[in-house]
């Protein structure tokens, strides 16, 4: 069974300032906004990154789950890891056998999926979806509006996700849990950090060291024009350390 990293979701107190910075620094464009999220007290914007997507959500009313998460993690940051599979039913059966609670299920024409309770997975909200056209890496994606997202695809500055970083006080334990859920064997990198290889990118598990606790803390991007990223990051007032730029509380590694 195949599993592809298709979307990363960030959460912010205010949406538009974050989108302005992401588009300026990484040369991306907004491809879709979902008006249906207002039922959850949220607004969003989705930006294609190669054949995957970077989403930002922000609360538009009080007492939302997103607002509670922002307070718990001390500000803007990572929220969800969203994957695409080739066959949803056996994955959902596997997750339910593990005793993992589902916090949200989706069933639309050509698209189904579920989100798992972060207390049962650790690290972040883990979502597994199926969308017709899985055999096409750049195929349709319902959360990004279906088939029209390619018109907003920009690859002149960054071209793809390479890896995503989950941090924890016990990275090995967290990695083993995600490996069990994803049904993918773990590997390690040169630093001995656990790696979970998806079809098109990897999850890296590291020790939490920034004072923000467990969560999604970093994204590595394949960069086409690093000079553009660094110049615009400086103009936007982003923190820059070597080949790492911080936007929306996320450490973006330039690779």
Image (spheres, grey):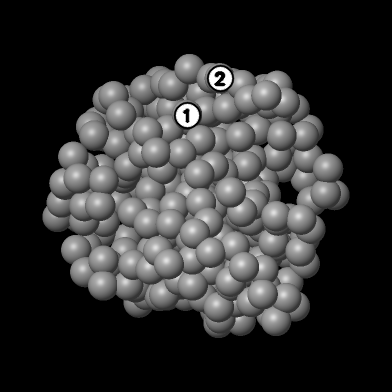
Q: Which mark is residue 197?
A: 1
Q: Residue at x 21, y 52 (%)?
A: 139
Helix, strand or loop at mark 2: strand
Q: Which mark is residue 129?
A: none
Residue 123: percent from left, percent from top: 63, 40
**Sequence-wise, which precedes: disc 1 or disc 2?**
2
How crowded pointer 1 is (Cα within 10 Å; few <14, some 14-19, many 20+) is rated as many
Q: Left or right of 121: which side holds 139? A: left
Q: Residue at x 37, y 57 (%)?
A: 50
Helix, strand or loop at mark 1: strand
Q: Which residue is mark 2?
A: 187
Indicate the quadrant where residue 113 lies: top left
Residue 108: percent from left, percent from top: 20, 55
Q: Calculate the distance from the C-alpha at mark 1 to the C-alpha at mark 2.
A: 7 Å
Q: Left or right of 145: which side holds 182? A: right
One can see residue 174 in this view: yes
Instruction: Tell me: residue 15, above or below residue 187.
Output: below
Instruction: Tell me: residue 85, above or below residue 189.
Output: below
One can see residue 63 in this view: no
- Looking at the image, do the residues carrying marks 1 and 2 touch, with CB atoms under 8 Å apart? yes
């Amino acid at each position: 069974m195949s599993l592809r990293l298709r979307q990363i979701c960030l959460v912010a107190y205010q949406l538009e300032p974050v989108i302005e910075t992401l588009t300026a620094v990484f040369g991306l464009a907004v491809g879709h906004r979902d008006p249906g999220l207002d039922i959850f007290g949220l607004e969003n914007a989705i930006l294609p990154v190669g054949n995957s997507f970077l989403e930002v959500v922000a609360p538009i009313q009080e007492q939302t789950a997103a607002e509670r998460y922002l307070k718990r993690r001390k500000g803007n940051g990572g929220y969800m890891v969203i994957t695409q599979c080739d066959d949803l039913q056996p994955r959902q059966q596997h997750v339910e056998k593990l005793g993992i609670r589902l916090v949200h299920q989706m069933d639309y024409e050509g698209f189904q999926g579920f989100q798992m309770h972060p207390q049962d997975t650790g690290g972040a909200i883990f979502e597994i979806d199926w969308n017709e056209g899985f055999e096409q890496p750049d195929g349709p994606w319902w959360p990004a509006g279906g088939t029209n997202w390619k018109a907003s695809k920009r690859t002149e500055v960054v071209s793809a996700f390479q890896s995503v970083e989950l941090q924890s006080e016990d990275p090995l334990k967290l990695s083993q849990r995600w490996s069990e859920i994803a049904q993918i064997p773990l590997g390690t990198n040169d630093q001995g950090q656990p790696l979970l290889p998806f079809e098109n990118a990897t999850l890296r598990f590291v020790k939490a060291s920034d004072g923000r606790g467990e969560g999604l803390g970093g994204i590595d991007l394949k960069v086409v024009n690093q000079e553009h990223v660094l110049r615009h990051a400086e103009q936007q007032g982003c923190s820059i350390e070597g080949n790492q730029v911080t936007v929306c509380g996320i450490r973006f590694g330039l690779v």
